[in-house]
């Protein structure tokens, strides 16, 4: 609503400093904390675990595929963030992103309202 309008109208850029992370250990602990504390992590584990149960004797192959896909996804996110970081130092980039998200969420809400959830 109002916050989105303000963000699209006059959002600022991402401020980057030149200081390095305090240590690799601190960065790894922070990353582990963000992933393990995230409720989506636990939800995904429950869903994937219940799906894996359907594979019977091929559960280990399914698990290997899940681990591989997860590693590839997280690597792609990290590399994408690194490549896009300079772009997001510009306020206009944030305005476009905020506006796109606002439009997508509005379309989703309107679709759900018109068609119903079930």
Image (spheres, helix red, strand yellow):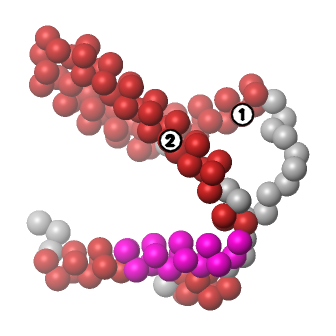
Q: Is residue 104 magenta?
A: yes
Q: x%, y% of residue 104?
A: 37, 74
Residue for badge 1: 27
Disc 2 designates what residue? 76
Instruction: State the predominant SS element of the stretch in magenta.
Output: helix
Q: Quadrant of residue 8?
A: bottom right
Q: Along the line of sight, which residue is nearer the eye, 44 or 60?
A: 60
Q: Any magenta on residue 99?
A: yes
Circle 2 sits in a helix, a strand or a loop, which is it? helix
Res. 39 in view: yes
Does residue 68 appear to the left or right of 91 in the view shown? Answer: left
Residue found at the very far top of the displayed protein: 57
Determine the secondary structure under disc 1: helix
Q: Which residues are magenta?
A: 90-105
Which residue is rendered at x = 65% and y = 48% of the image?
Answer: 82
Q: Is residue 19 above or below residue 5?
A: above
- Binning the other alpha carbons within 10 Å of mark 2 as few (below 14), some (14 to 19) or many (20 upward) gives few
Q: Residue at x 72, y 34 (%)?
A: 27
Q: Tell me the quarter of the image containing the C terminus.
A: bottom left
Query: In terms of depth relative to the viewer, which is nearer, 74 or 118?
Result: 74
Residue at x-position 17% and y-position 82%: 114
**Mark in the foreground, 1 or 2:** 2
* Picture coordinates of residue 16, whole percent (x, y): 80, 57
């Amino acid at each position: 609503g109002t916050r989105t309008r303000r963000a699209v109208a006059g959002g600022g850029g991402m401020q980057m400093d030149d200081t390095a992370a305090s240590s690799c250990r601190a960065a790894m602990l922070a990353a582990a904390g963000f992933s393990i504390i995230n409720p989506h992590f636990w939800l995904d584990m429950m869903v994937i675990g219940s799906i894996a149960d359907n594979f019977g004797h091929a559960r280990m192959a399914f698990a290997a595929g899940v681990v591989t896909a997860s590693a590839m996804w997280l690597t792609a996110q990290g590399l994408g963030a690194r490549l896009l970081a300079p772009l997001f130092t510009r306020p206009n980039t944030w305005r476009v992103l905020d506006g796109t998200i606002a439009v997508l969420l509005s379309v989703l809400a309107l679709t759900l309202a018109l068609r119903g959830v079930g």
